[in-house]
Amino acid sequence: MGPNWVAFKTLFTALDLDVILPDPTNREAIKIGVRYSPEFVCFPFKATIGDFKNALALQEVTGRRDPFIYSKFVKAVIFFLKKAKLLNDIQTAEGVFRAYERNLGDTTNIFNDLLLKLDEANTLSELRNFKKVIKEDFNSLDIDKTRSPLKVGLSGEIHISLEPYVNLDIRRKLGEMQIEIHQSLIPTLCLT
């Protein structure tokens, strides 16, 4: 689901599981999902099925080691939650800064670079200091402070909200129209 691969990858690698990153959701994945899903299910289900089918085609899943040793599990969850929060911080800044950027695409470049940096941050020390990295990177943008952009709040089903291919990259498109985007994107776990 969009950039959340960074947090989920950390969760599974911390459990000593091999992670195979699938291709981003695309037209072919959607076609596959539609083919293998019941007609009545929601579109996000179809996109997810297509993504899973494509991911399984990359490599046979084998060699599981005992991932549920308590300390590994706790560490994995802590890293996952920290990265999920940092992803939200990155996306919050992206939603605001893009409306003020002077050079179209600079915010997108910083956003993509930060995703890679966050993916490579694998110690608690790096994660504790990552807010500073986010701030420094976004503050390096050439922005026009005289703008007074329209501010829009986005909401909706989580998969559609998070996956740029599925939502037609609405966050980027609105931002490039100098619209400030506000959206809570933290994936949450519901326990009932």
Image: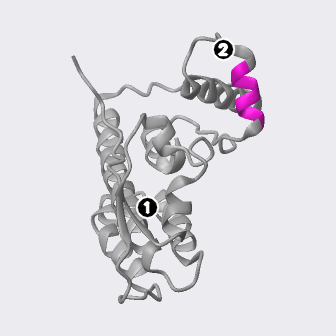
Specify the amino acid type for callout 2.
Ser
- In the picture, measured across the screen, residue 69 lies left or right of residue 137, that is left
Magenta stretch, residue numbers: 28-34
**Is residue 13 in view?**
no
Residue at mark 2 to residue at mark 1: CA–CA distance = 37 Å
For the C terminus, the quadrant is top left
Specify the amino acid type for callout 1.
Ala
Determine the residue positioned at 64% across, 27% down: 52
- Residue under label 1, please give it: 121
- In the picture, measured across the screen, residue 103 lies left or right of residue 132, that is right
- Residue under label 2, please give it: 37
Labelled pair 2, 1 in contact (Cβ < 8 Å): no
Determine the residue positioned at 37% across, 25% down: 68
Determine the residue positioned at 47% across, 73% down: 178
Q: Is residue 95 above or below residue 148?
A: above
Residue 9 locus on image (x, y percent): 50, 44
Answer with the quarter of the image where residue 91 lies.
bottom left
Determine the residue positioned at 31% across, 36% down: 188
Numbered circles on residues, count? 2
Residue 102 locus on image (x, y percent): 52, 86
Mark seen at residue 151: none
